[in-house]
Image (cartoon, rainbow, N blue to C red):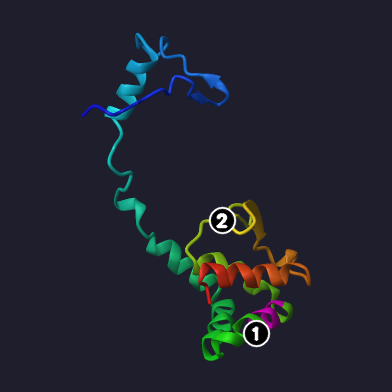
Amino acid sequence: MKKNIGNINSARTGGRMIRFEELGFESFDAYLQRFFDTLLPSNKTYEYFVDWEKVKKAVNEHLDEIYLLNSLSEVENRERGKKLAELLKKYPQVVEVIPLLIAERVKRGVIEIFDPEIEAFLEFSFAKSRVNEKTIPEIVKFCRNTGAF
């Protein structure tokens, strides 16, 4: 299956041109064609899906925080932001569970997300040590925008 590679000769990797000759190709087009021809339709294997043992372990480690956040389900939708803010003030450790709720893998307690409203990347910290009067409204907005509540 021939792909339309167009004018991609300016493609760069890590700031340097691809050294297609060192990879055994006669031209960049030959390299690029081989690249497209060998792409897999998916990267999903059985391991791609949920690691239930890891989920169970995380749930058991954070049962109290999950129960606290679950209490928000009993609150009117329009009041959930306010109640979440109150929970965060009183129990800042609940912030560490939010990435689990949206099934997001977090590195160093931080999620980086593109906000189309301001056309910029935002960084959200989900470490209890970072919960304060300034970050609580940001966390509430994050939860609202991601559909966590």
Taking the image as shown, residue 120 lies to the left or right of residue 132, namely left
Quick check: is 87 in the magenta stretch? yes
What residue appears at the point 68 percent right and 63 percent down from the top-left corner?
A: 127
Q: Say if mark 1 contacts mark 2, CB within 8 Å.
A: no
Quick check: is 38 in the magenta stretch? no
Taking the image as shown, residue 149 lies to the left or right of residue 110, namely left
Q: Is residue 95 above or below residue 3?
A: below
Q: Residue furthest left?
A: 1
What amino acid is labelled 1 in the image? Answer: Lys
What amino acid is labelled 2 in the image? Answer: Val
Q: Residues within 10 Å of mark 1 (few under 14, many from 20)?
A: some
Taking the image as shown, residue 147 lies to the left or right of residue 40, namely right
Residue 72 % position (x, y): 56, 85
Residue 93 % position (x, y): 66, 72
Task: Give the total of numbered labels.
Answer: 2
Looking at the rendering, the stretch of residues picked out in magenta corresponds to: 83-88
Q: Is residue 77 above or below residue 30?
A: below
Q: Which residue is mark 1?
A: 83
Residue 92 % position (x, y): 70, 74
Distance in Å between CA atoms under marks 1 and 2: 24 Å
Q: Which residue is mark 2?
A: 106
Does the magenta stretch mainly form a helix, a strand or a loop? helix
Please identify the quarter of the rendering in which residue 1 is found.
top left
